[in-house]
Image (cartoon, rainbow, N blue to C red):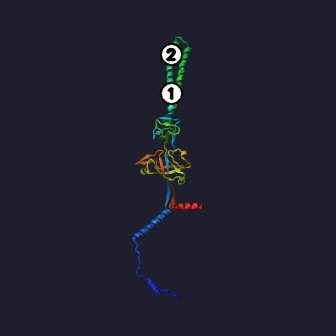
Amino acid sequence: MKKEFFRQEVFNQKKISHLGVISINTPLSFKFFTYSSLVILLIIILFIVFGEFSDKFVVIGYLNDSKGVFSLYPSKSGVIIKSYKKQGEFVKQGEAILLINSLVDNQLLDKNNILENLIKRKQSIKNDIINKSIQLKKIKILLTKKYISLDFYNTKKQEIFELNRNLNAVELDIIKYKQEQFYKIYSPIDGVIASNIFKEGQYVNLAKPLVKILPIKSKLIANLFIPVNQIGFINKASKIIVRYDAFPYKRFGSYKAVIDSIDETILTDNEDEKPIQVGYPYYKVNAKLKSQYVMVYGQPKKLQQGLTITAIISGPKRKIWQWILDPIFSMYGELKL
């Protein structure tokens, strides 16, 4: 039988410490810090696991009319002589908006010379008619006394008739030349003058519109230009935040809107007529405004067509842990390829 090397008394003696029981005194602040750290760590873990966030990006755009804006172009180049309507005023269908002189510089000088000659000719014919009429009265007296023949009298009478016919022709030429020189721009619809692009005295050509008219009872919408690499983040009915460039959002706030339609065609600045330049290929998106007004110092102010805007669009929600692990998943996918 194998015996222990040490006696049992030795082991019993080892169990009895001459220093007494050792007790570690932990400060209360250390316990509080430990528990607080554990709670914070737990909150962070829960936030990472259950927390969600959305990618946000900023795009530019402008306010446009839902029914479209009517742009009026000149039929001939010229100079604006008179403007009958100002921006913001109501205009009826068929009402004159602008008067334009289509002749300028050398053309105007040549035309004025022609008109002056026609007016002189008109006056000359009138004088001839007056003189011939006086002569005809005298000839008629001679005819009654049978000093002249009836044929001679009728010949003089026919001369006056020809002069009157020439006078009518000259007057028609004068009217025609004046109509060719001056013409008016009329409104095709009932609406409101959105903008007078040109003022009195300015030269106009066929390339640019003169006036833009908003149809009555129409609403403004937001036209947004979404970059190609961000179109996948938005859907119809997505909510967006709109900020009007003319009214800084830090003073006048931001406003809500909802995506209404998304064009399926990629556009560029050269393919789309608009008041701003985007500078990159884009998809055109229309959004409905929650309000047609902006609050300015407590008072509602109606928004105007063409006002440039900045919109903040939120993408689909994702878990925070997905966002953290995305680089790893992407790297793993590339390695598999």
Q: Secondary structure at mark 1?
A: helix
The front one of 313 and 21 is: 21
The residue sitting at 50% across, 14% down in the picture is: 138
What is the x, y in percent for residue 261? 53, 50
Q: Is residue 311 above or below residue 50?
A: above
Residue, far right: 337
Q: Secondary structure at mark 2?
A: helix
Q: Is residue 173 above or below residue 226?
A: above
- Left or right of 285? Residue 20 is left
**Type of the residue with mark 2:** Gln
The residue sitting at 57% across, 60% down in the picture is: 334
Q: Quadrant of the C terminus?
A: bottom right
Comparing marks 2 and 1, which lies closer to the viewer?
Answer: 1
Q: Residues within 10 Å of mark 2 (few under 14, many from 20)?
A: few
Q: Is residue 223 above or below residue 31?
A: above
What is the x, y in percent for residue 110? 51, 29
Q: Quadrant of residue 10?
A: bottom left
Q: Quadrant of residue 28?
A: bottom left
Q: Is residue 206 above or below residue 307?
A: above
Q: Can residue 334 be seen at all in this image of the molecule?
A: yes
Q: CA gap, disc 2 to disc 1?
A: 33 Å
Q: Residues within 10 Å of mark 1 (few under 14, many from 20)?
A: few
Q: Can residue 96 be seen at all in this image of the molecule?
A: no
**Type of the residue with mark 1:** Asn
- Tell me, for residue 147, which label it has, or none: none
CB contact under 8 Å: marks 2 and 1: no
Q: How many marks?
A: 2
Q: To which residue does mark 2 refer?
A: 135
What is the x, y in percent for residue 107? 51, 31
Q: To which residue does mark 1 refer?
A: 113
